[in-house]
Amino acid sequence: MRKVFNFSAGPATLPEEVLAQAAAEMLDWHGSGQSVMEMSHRGKEYMSIHEQAERDLRTLMGIPSNYKVLFLQGGATMQFAMIPVNLMRGKAGADYVNTGEWSKKAIKEAKLFGAVNVVASSEDRSFTYVPPQAQWKRAADAAYLHYCANETIGGVEFGWIPESGDVPLVADVSSNFLSRPLDVSKFGLLYGGAQKNIGPAGLTIVVVREDLLGHAPKSTPTMLDYKAQADNDSMLNTPPTWAIYIAGLVFQWIARQGGLAAIERRNVEKASLLYDYLDSTQFYRNPVDRADRSRMNVPFTLRDDALDEPFLKGAKERNLLQLKGHRSVGGMRASIYNAMPIEGVRALVDYLREFEKSHG
Ligand SMILES: *Cc1c(COP(=O)(O)O)cnc(C)c1O
């Protein structure tokens, strides 16, 4: 067992088993005499890794055959631009839900390419809830409907999938990718950076319905055109081979845990343990409406922010790392992605209790 529990929001903790396997295969992958990092991306060894990773992701998520899986670079942030470029399809604008900092960034970028209609915003209460769909004001002819399924900074997660009718539904799932089963057929496009819940930084996964390909304007740079990427199996240029390899090992690890339903049960158990404790005391506080709380990112404040420094110092002494909250909201944040074992959450709750006792 490793000594520390890392609660970083991303790059984030990875399953120890995956790291051990990668270490064992580092110098000589499956008798090839090479590390995966050194392989030609067009050679048969690497191709087998790449294809296996896609197959395993398809199986895990139950991705229908009329969807493409793309392994891209540029982060979820690049998708904030690629989505409007490819999906605007001659329409005047798109619908966006604004539930926090990542929604805001997606909206800002989309405005470079068309009109953005913000259907609903939770900014009135500092992004502490998901506006119910009954209150959304959708445009008549939106190219697509975009939302952020889990706001990593605010700790707000959609526990439901919006109803978009014939309008393609687009979701940023960067920080809750593979944390629960998801009906892919309800979406036009899903995307996320790997470094939160899937693997190392440098890989962005896009799952896109085929009929949405091929609509980018002629002037679109080839690298930013989903169709060009899909036609070339994400190998228009050198893909992030190492990150794809590790992501593939993570997919296999999830399958060994029992798949997404089993992962979801564990995530619910971990999140409940932490929220139940936070709710049981006046000393700590999580501001998010209960129904909309994230299972992945748990922000909380201490009763007095003068205690933040001693809290973080004591946490570090107990090998509980990276609990400092995002600079925009302050306080603390515990990210408890798939790879965080329940022992890590137990150790955190024990420390919360102990710190309260000595400082409450
Ligand atoms: C981290 C994050 C992003 C940005 O990801 P990059 O890969 O760094 O571009 C976007 N959306 C959400 C929800 C995130 O958590």
Image (spheres, grey):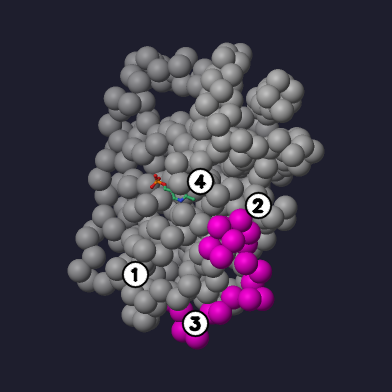
* Earlier sequence position, callout 3 versus callout 2: 3
Residue 302: quarter of image: top right
Taking the spot 20% from the left edge, 69% from the top edge, the residue there is: 219
Q: Is residue 81 left or right of residue 64?
A: left
Q: Amino acid at mark 4?
A: Val
Q: Residues within 10 Å of mark 4 (few under 14, many from 20)?
A: some
Q: Is residue 228 left or right of residue 128?
A: left
Which residue corresponds to mark 1?
111
Label 3 to label 1, Cα distance in Å? 15 Å
Which residue corresponds to mark 4?
329
Q: Are marks 2 and 1 in contact (CB under 8 Å)?
A: no
Q: Are marks 3 and 2 in contact (CB under 8 Å)?
A: no
Q: CB at mark 4 closer than 8 A to ligand 1?
A: no
Pick the residue in front: 155 or 343: 155
Q: Amino acid at mark 1?
A: Lys
Q: Amino acid at mark 3?
A: Ala
Q: Which residues are magenta?
A: 123-143
Which residue corresponds to mark 3?
139
* Earlier sequence position, callout 3 versus callout 4: 3
Label 3 to label 2, Cα distance in Å? 28 Å
Residue farthest to the left, as pictured: 219
Q: Position of residue 19 (x, y in %)?
A: 50, 22
Label 2 to label 1, Cα distance in Å? 28 Å
Does the image show residue 78? yes
**Of tags 3 and 4, which is closer to the observer?**
4
Q: Quadrant of the C terminus?
A: top right
Q: Are marks 4 and 2 in contact (CB under 8 Å)?
A: no
Which residue corresponds to mark 2?
288
Helix, strand, or loop for circle 1? Answer: loop
Magenta segment, principal secondary structure?
loop
Taking the spot 62% from the left edge, 62% from the top edge, the residue there is: 130
Helix, strand, or loop for circle 4? Answer: loop
